[in-house]
Amino acid sequence: SPWDYYIVGFGVDPALRISVFDELTLGEGFDGVTQVQGFHSESRAFHFQGSTREVMAPVEVSEQMVQKLRGKNEFTVLATLKQDHLNSGVILSIHHSENRFLELESSGQRSEVRLHYRTKGQQPHTEVFPYSLDDDQWHKVSVAVSASHVILHVDCNRIYERVVEAPYMDIPEDASFWLGQRNAAHGFFKGVMQDVEILVMPQGYISQCPDLNRTCPTCNDFHGLVQKIMELQDILAKTSKQLSRAEEKMNGLDGCYCERTCSVKGVVYREDEGWTDGCRNCTCTNGTVQCEAISCPPPQCPAGTAPAYVKGACCKECQREWSTLNLLYMFQITPLFFSPLGLNLFLSVPPAGHDFCSEGHSCVEHSDCVNLEAGDCCVCKDGFRPLRDDNAYCEDIDECAEGKHYCRENTMCVNTPGSFMCICHTGYIRIDDYSCTEHDECLSGLHNCDENALCFNMVGGHSCSCKPGYTGNGTVCKAMCDGLCQNGGTCISPNNCVCQQGFTGKRCETDINECKTGRNTCANDTVCFNLDGGYDCRCPHGHNCSGDCIHDNKVKHSGQIWVLDSDRCSVCSCQAGQVMCRRMVCDCDNPNADLFCCPECDPRLSSQCLHQNGLLTYGSGDTWVENCQQCQCLQGQVDCWPLPCPPVDCEFTVVPEGECCPRCVTDPCQADTIRNDITKTCTDEHNISRFSGSSWIKHGTECTLCQCKVRYQPHQQPPSSKLQFVYFSGRQHTKEKWFGN
């Protein structure tokens, strides 16, 4: 293994190790953190307690630690810890604003270990491992990530091994690094921690558990080899094309002369060479075309003639006038004109709607022919003006030079044929076709719009507008559901309720029937009767039901009351052979009320939870939905977990805007998530095979990104590959796609 060189006597190269305790110098006065006896005496251990501490790395220390981790797709998070019972807290967190790039959390309330990160598609992701660490016992914990491969070890035992979406580790330089908490207000870990480290290597658990030394390559080892092959293919194609261009240039060096020329309509003109372009005289000056309108002197016409335009000429020429004598002379020498046919031809009027332009016209440069009732005329195109009074020749109007444009602040006007463009100054961002701003508050996240609102950037600020299906002023938007969510359900998106456990239905109006689902403990010939929120076990008439009850393979005597081992908040009783279980009734007037089962009865301010925006306060027992997570406040601690989503069995999925769960789509170009199969390929424009999931810049361009995506056809048909081209420009983003091999 290449990583064996970095492990010497189970030590790790310091360049690959981030020792969090040493970097933060924990022994130097953090409130709420004290040094105690650890799992072993080889390193220091610290007790984390209270909810007012702020264990965050200084800016320069955070930058040094993040620098080692930035851009890496193989790393291991290690910790030896002893967590207090029912505590839900963060072991370490690296985040920027609300974006968690790497966070390891242990939830004692739900018995889960959670790994939070961002995917390469810039989406938040939480990988949940059902496991309880909050037993007030020492545990060695490691989470090893190798590209899309994740392994969880607890006490040197491999607990879970999964294939997930690969993390996006381009962490910003100003990201925050927290230990034992998510931020100053949430996720406080309570207990003792020792040896908290991040190793920039795939099997870092070997340093924690030497007996687990590996022999097999990681997924990233294999993906790295595939990536190198694709990079070599790309380099080969680019090198071949560059070599071909170089040969062409070498062949033309003999005739090369360093003279600045001008190219117009496919014709090359040399320096100071002149030519006529329509009704303009043009000259090539220092490689730039300069043109001016032809100057026409007034013609001196003899008697019987008048100045008029001739087809193909720019200036008026003397033309003979047609008088009545001329016509009579023509009639005398042409007897046909005295015939009825001749007179009819001479006096005939074209029918309405006649297309004179199709019979030939004199409209030439940037001029359009327009039909009139008795003939045709020339009209200059938009953005052009006439060079002569019949509009046959027209020239471009320079809106920029003449001040006839609409470019606003922070832009530069650039003339184009028939129009103009407003170009943003360097360092400014476009708002619309005519204006730019120094900062895009919407793109940078420096705005106060609600997550369910649309942000619109404006000069000097921004505006917010709630998305369809939500109501509010833009800074606060709430989902609108068709009727209230019942039985404690929460409205998380338009007409979408998340139900509390035990209820189903669009509005959470349906109670789960324990009798039909078999989730009851009725025995000894008793019959299950469903009740609102529970059930009863009753003895049918004519049956001899014993007064005792059987519960969890144990005999319970009639009248006996007990608390469920699996749920301390549920109370069961045996009554004449019937087992009846109910949730504990919360009597907040009773000073002995169990605050764990009845958190709403906890009056202490220390049991309240503050929302991360600092504006809302939740009481103990309150639940809410935040960023597609179900959150609950219990005795001053906030615990959040991903909303449950139904499984989707398809290759391509997308999470619609305003929703939390993925849906299947058939077009891979619309998908957020794709199951890539690197054994399938696409063929690019140079007949080079590209692996599924790979991307590259199209040869000869700078703004065209190509991607290879695989579509699996039903009924075991051979898979087909789709080659997708994405074009980028200053104003739009479009896609082109076609099928490959």
Image (cartoon, rainbow, N blue to C red):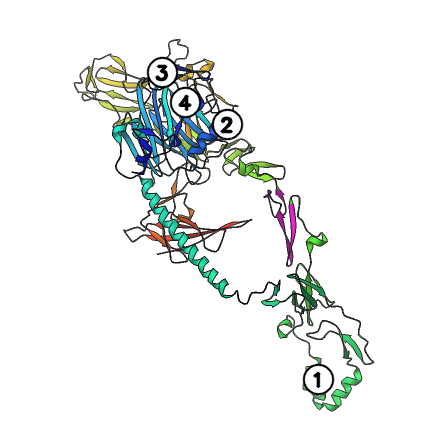
Range of magenta residues: 411-436
Q: CA distance from mark 1 to mark 4?
A: 111 Å
On the image, numbered disc 1 is attached to which residue? 343
Of marks 1 and 4, the one in the foreground: 4
Number of other residues with Cα within 10 Å of mark 2, as a class: few under 14, some 14 to 19, many 20 or more: few
| Residue type indicated by callout 2 | Val
Which badge, 1 or 4, is on the more N-terminal residue? 4
Return the residue at label 3.
585
Label 3 and label 4: CA atoms lie apart by: 46 Å
The reply to whether the C-beta atoms of the residues labelled 1 and 4 are less than 8 Å apart is no
Give the Cα distance between marks 1 and 2: 100 Å
| Residue under pointer 4 | 21
The image shows residue 189 at horizontal and vertical percentages of 40, 21
Judged from the image, the secondary structure of the residue bearing numbered disc 2 is: helix
- Residue 265 sits in which quadrant? bottom right
- Which sits in the foreground, 364 or 666? 364
Q: Residues within 10 Å of mark 4 (few under 14, many from 20)?
A: some
Task: Identify which residue, 519 or 113, lies in the foreground.
Answer: 113
For the residues carrying marks 1 and 2, which lies nearer the camera in this image? 2
Spot occupied by residue 291 in the image (x, y as percentages of width and height): 69, 64
What's the amino acid at mark 4? Phe
